[in-house]
Image: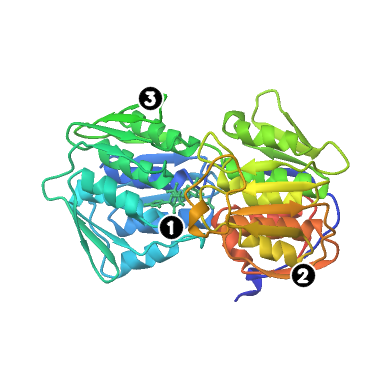
Amino acid sequence: MTVDDTLHITGGAPLYGTVPVRGSKNAVPKLMVAALLTEQPVTIRNVSFVRDIGIVADLVEALGSTTTSDPAGGVVSITARDVHLAGEGELAVFHERSRIPVLTCAPLLHRTGKAEIWRPGGCSIGERPVGFHLDVLRAFGAKDERTDTGYVLTAPAGLRGAIIDLPFPSVGATEQFLLGAVVAAGDSVLNNAAVEPEIMDLIGMLQRMGALITVKPNRSIQVTGVHTLRGVDYTAVPDRLEAASWAGLALATDGRITVSGVRQGDLSTYLNVYRRAGGDFEFSTDGGEVTFWRERPMPRPLVIETDVHPGFMTDWQPPLITALTQADGVTVLHETVYEDRLGYTEALRALGAQIQVFTECLGSTPCRFGSRNHRHSAVIVGPAKLQGTDLHVPDLRAGFSYVLAALSAQGTSTISGASLLDRGYENFRAKLLAVGAKLH
Ligand code: EPU
């Protein structure tokens, strides 16, 4: 473990300042993968140079693209003229580091007739299977063979349009569908699709590349395949998860934090909940900047259920729940997207939070996990006096919550594994220092 991997944080003081956010960590990598669908140059702007961007740049290069990056300007350019499969073992390394390589299947089947899936990595939040992705690819006519380490897929006759019903509106499976359907022969329909802003962003870029995509009001996406796609110069959607993370920090520490580079529409569900939790906010006239603060002595307890868009997104949950350990009363949480995303509450308990986790659905929507013994609901009793302690970061969003909790706690906390935060937060340490956090 490097020195850089450990943060020593002294909390207990309100934080004030401004942090810029750039393109969404959960949108830009998909835009980079979409560049594999055309031989022409693709330029993506407003890129936040989090660690995952470097991994995906290496990935598309390993698949035959040339890439150039301008981290200061936030620009990545990709030209995928001679796409080929990655070398033996090379893809395995990418799959261990990220979920994104799974999404290269549809473009690779289109460009080379072959693709591979290795046991996918990314954050450790539950099992994160790939069954929906395989269902989509099989419907497009791909054949798959199970190997010791994953799957080998082939589509010697190319991909053909299909009608597909998703059992759950999975973000990744919807992206896999889009990346395949836009160049498949004929028409395709995806029912029960995810419609997150990051997916709309992918649709926006594909449309500018020449794709024909219609999103229906009932979560159905219709695509007419086209023969070729062209290059594009595209500006990515801002990171609504990062914006909400800094908002949580303002609420938890009773500070005042301005986040620049945002888009209000993508945050509207969060903003309503934030206000009900006793926070408030104000946008700049052009809407590109928002300031968050607590408008009462203590945050207000809530009943929260995570859901697919336009519901309250799962990635917003850990920082808000951490802030609500300071609320005046009982908060009830029902996590309906991931079966195992409450592990971070143990660390909060170690800091002094009063949280109990349940296998029952503590919400009005019965979810997929209720009868399967997954600890996916929680009751949080506030306000808790948090006291600094030693913590280890298990996944990206939990990691931010530990930092948030440490900054709300009295005394000093030592957080190991903190470099995981570089996956999703650009210049993380510099931004914390900019809002006055005491850390080294
Ligand atoms: N699922 C399956 N089978 C599949 C695919 C998904 O059962 O084949 C299940 C998952 O296990 C999970 C649920 O469906 O319970 C949702 O998964 P989804 O496919 O929607 O998520 P994802 O595409 O893997 C993206 C983001 C996540 C974010 C989710 C939900 C990226 C790289 N990741 O994941 O972001 O939580 O959508 O919005 O875009 C993060 O930023 O920290 C993060 C984890």
Under mark 1, the amino acid is: Arg
Q: Which residue is mark 3?
A: 216
Separation (CA) of disc 1 from disc 2: 30 Å
Residue depicted at 60% across the width and 53% down the height: 425
- Identified at 58% across, 53% down, the residue is 360
**Image position of 106 with respect to 417: above or below:** above
Q: Quadrant of residue 386?
A: bottom right
- What residue appears at the point 17 percent right and 46 percent down from the top-left corner? 141
Choose between 47 and 425: the one closer to the eye: 425
Please state the horizontal and vertical placement of residue 210, each as a whole percent of the image. Answer: 29, 29
Query: Mark 2 highlights which residue?
Result: 389
Q: Position of residue 248 (x, y in %)?
A: 71, 46
Marks 3 and 2: in contact by CB < 8 Å?
A: no
Tell me the quarter of the image containing the N terminus: bottom right
Residue 287 or 72: which is nearer the viewer?
287
Q: Earlier in the sequence, mark 1 or mark 2?
A: 1
For this rendering, which residue is in front, 32 or 370? 370
Mark 1 lies on residue: 128
- Residue 325, image x, y percentages: 77, 53
For the question of whether residue 236 can be seen, the reply is no
Circle 3 — which element?
loop
- Identity of the residue furthest to the right in this view: 297
Image quadrant where residue 303 sits: top right
Amino acid at pointer 3: Lys
**If you read the primary sequence from the N terminus, does the residue marked by circle 1 or circle 3 appear first?**
1
Distance CA(mark 2)–CA(mark 3)? 49 Å
